Image: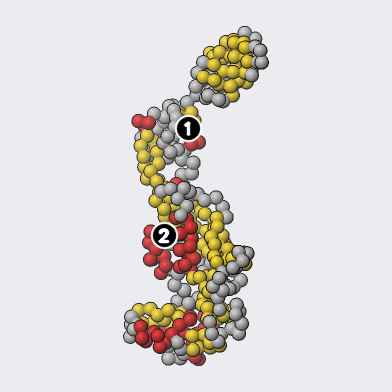
Amino acid sequence: MFGIGTQGRFAPLRRVFTILALAICLLVPTVSAQAVEMRQGWWLQIKNAACVHGPMVLLGDIATPQGDMPASAWQALASRPLWNAPERTGRQMALSRDKLLAMLRYYAEDIAGACALPTQLVVQRGGKVIDGADIMQHVVDFLTARGPAFSGELDIKDLHGPDYIFLSNERDQLAVLPSSPLKPGRVNLLFEMRGSDGKVIRRYSASAFVNVWRALPVLARPLNRQEPLNLSYVKFKRCNLAFNENSWDGTGGPWRMVRGVGVDQVIRMSDIEPVPVIARGDKVNLVFEGDNIRLQVKAEALADGGIGQRIEVRNLQSKRKIMATVQDQDTVLVR
């Protein structure tokens, strides 16, 4: 379980976006090592955080019925008073598992054995508590709404964040913001609790690992350095963008290989480069342009270059080396 107490402690929670029901089940607080008694097919799960709105803590404030309990039976149990609530609005009471068990045995001895206990219960007078399932849903909604950043089949898991967040009152709002660039892989998020005036009251850190599955171009045959990337050598394979950053999208070109890439390996942008318009060793026209003059001489390209790129060339008359801009496959320009 991941958790946060009143001091802001965090620990991990795992979930897979495509199996939401299972993930929500994982949010159930840790059960006491003591066996829970079944009462005619039902038992009570004690929450790890709850808000009360009266002078007494009611069983319905801190417990959730599990199993097959008649609605009328739960209605009667839920209104059962237990112990005094914190005196002032916003004040909290933290009970360890041992203390909570002792309190239940004292105030509700007849059902204490049918209660599954968390490691700690925190009770706040007034306000609102957002539990782990709702926090998780905030994260899922935030990430799935960012389509351009996560274009593909989304799979969210290994979420870290607060087990619960207390709001001071019903007017407070919880906002989710990215604290790192949104891209496949580990994403860091920030929960901001804001008051009715929009001011930030408190912040909580969170993160999730985002797998994005998409068809990516891979090689059907190995290619070596400087070989042209012929589209007939390319096929598409379902891959995880989280582990294939900066992959080629299969468009543009013509391209050639910067390094050797094997069969079924994803082609990254760092693996390819545009096929040069002018190749090293080519003979080109070196054009000098000024305000009132235009000269042209023959030169040798000393490097590969595409249109608009600057490359070094050698004037074949003076043997002088100079930087020039590639204008087309036959011409480089100096201004």
- Mark 1 and mark 2 lie on one chain; the one further toward the N terminus is 2
Quarter-of-image position of residue 215: top left
What residue lies at 45% left-to-right and 63% top-to-bottom? 137
Quarter-of-image position of residue 72: bottom left
Quarter-of-image position of residue 18: bottom left
Q: How many marks?
A: 2
From the top left corner, tell me how far across and down residue 149 is, in percent: 48, 48
Residue lying at the far front of the rendered structure = 197
Q: Secondary structure at mark 2?
A: loop
Q: Is residue 280 left or right of residue 25?
A: right
- Disc 2: CA contacts within 10 A as few (<14), some (14-19) or many (>=20): some
Mark 1–mark 2 Cα distance, whole angstroms, equals: 35 Å
Does the rendering let one see residue 114? Answer: yes
From the top left corner, tell me how far across and down residue 280 is, in percent: 53, 19
What residue lies at 41% left-to-right and 81% top-to-bottom? 44
From the top left corner, tell me how far across and down residue 71 is, in percent: 35, 83
What is the three-letter code of the residue carrying label 2? Val
User: With respect to residue 197, does 276 lie above or below?
Assistant: above
What is the three-letter code of the residue carrying label 1? Ile
What residue lies at 62% left-to-right and 10% top-to-bottom? 295
In the image, 146 versus 12, the foreground residue is 146
Residue behind mark 1: 272
Q: Secondary structure at mark 1?
A: strand
In the image, 332 versus 212, the foreground residue is 332
Residue behind mark 2: 16
Quarter of the image that includes the C terminus: top right
Q: Is residue 233 left or right of residue 326?
A: left
